[in-house]
Every structure is written in C-alpha cells, then in structure tokens.
Image: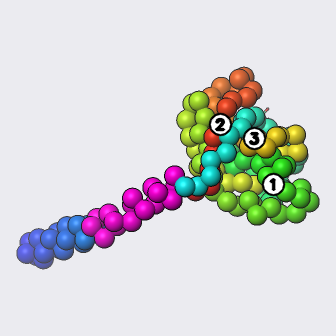
Amino acid sequence: MYRNTLLASILLIALIFSTTFTTAAPVPHLNTLEKRAKTYRGTATWFLPKEEGGEYGACGPKENNYSMIVAMNAKQYGNMNKKSKWCGKKIKVKGPHGSAIVKVNDACPGCSYGDLDLTPKVFKKVVGNMNKGVGKITWHAV
Ligand SMILES: *[C@@H]1O[C@H](CO)[C@@H](O)[C@H](O)[C@H]1NC(C)=O
C-alpha cells in the first residue's frame, strides 16, 4: 500500500517534470507572436447592452452588463448588418486600471477607429470607475 503510494508519487513528479520541460520551449515563441500582433489605440466608453441596442450583439450571442465582451468601432467591424470577421475573436484590452481578455460580440456605430465600447464589468476592470465615462486603451488580438 505504502510502496504503491510512493511509486505513484514518483510517477506524478516525473510526469510534472516532463510536462514542464516539454512545454518550456514553446513559451518564448508565444511571447514573440504576442508582440507581433498589431496593437490598436483608441478610447474606451461603456454601454448597457440590454437598455442600449438590445440583448443580442451584432455578432449574435446574448450580452449583458456582466459579459466579458466589447462592441467594436464600426470602421473596424465592417458591415453592421453582417457578422464581422472580428466576431468571437479574443482580444486583450489594456487601460489605466488594468487589462482584460474579452470577446468581440457587438458593433459600436458611434465609435471611431481603434475605439471599443465596453460592458460595465469590462470598463470597471480596464478603465476604473464608470463615472469617468472614457479612458485611453490599447488592444490586440490574442
Ligand atoms: C445594467 O447596469 C446599469 C447601471 O449600473 C443599471 O442601471 C441597469 O439596470 C443594468 N441592467 C441590467 C439588465 O441589469
């Protein structure tokens, strides 16, 4: 019984080590890719999905105050009556308060190139207090 437990522990440790070493190599490569992804700059604003524009994003899926999604400016979104190539794409948004990885789920007709309209949840995380209304952001695809 004890011997079996000891053997199991050794195997587990060996497994952890082998996993660590096999996954160690690709990490710098991923970092390089992340650096290469184009970074966009713009202004973040917030919107209330249900009250403004409806519960369904331009991309299709439902969204609410707490969704980790953004509405993309119309210029980059493309045809507002269609699903954009950005739909469902994950992006990392950085602002004065923090950063968040979110999905593109909607379009923002009044936003300029580079701008994103955020749900209250994402805005608080990235920009801070909602009373600020706007904040400078940078973002890139992940
Ligand atoms: C979303 O948040 C706003 C502001 O806090 C609030 O007034 C509104 O009732 C919320 N909407 C939903 C559907 O929870």
Instruction: Tell me which residue sits at (39%, 65%) in the image.
Output: 26
Tag shown at residue 122: none
> Under tag 1, what secondary structure?
helix
x and y percentages locating residue 25 in the rendered image:
33, 65
Single out the residue that lies furthest toward the right. 81
**Amino acid type shown at disc 1:** Tyr
Q: Quadrant of residue 89?
A: bottom right
Foreground of the two, 41 or 111: 41
- As measured in the structure, the alpha-carbon distance from the residue carrying label 1 to the one carrying label 3 is 11 Å
Asked whether mark 3 lies closer than 8 Å to ligand 1, one says no
Residue 48 visible in the shown view: no
Q: Is residue 84 left or right of residue 3?
A: right
Asked whether mark 2 lies closer than 8 Å to ligand 1, one says no
Q: Which residues are magenta?
A: 20-35
Tag 2 near tag 3, CB within 8 Å: no
**Amino acid type shown at disc 2:** Ile
Mark 3 lies on residue? 115
Upstream in the sequence, badge 2 or badge 3?
3
> Under tag 3, what secondary structure?
loop
x and y percentages locating residue 21 in the rendered image:
27, 67
Q: Is residue 23 placed above or below 135 in the rendered structure?
A: below
Tag shown at residue 77: 1
- As measured in the structure, the alpha-carbon distance from the residue carrying label 2 to the one carrying label 3 is 8 Å
Q: Is residue 133 placed above or below 82 in the rendered structure?
A: above
Mark 2 lies on residue? 137
Q: Is residue 37 left or right of residue 41?
A: left
x and y percentages locating residue 19 in the rendered image:
30, 69
Instruction: Tell me which residue sits at (15%, 71%) in the image.
Output: 10
Magenta stretch: residue 30 in it? yes
Foreground of the two, 45 or 32: 32
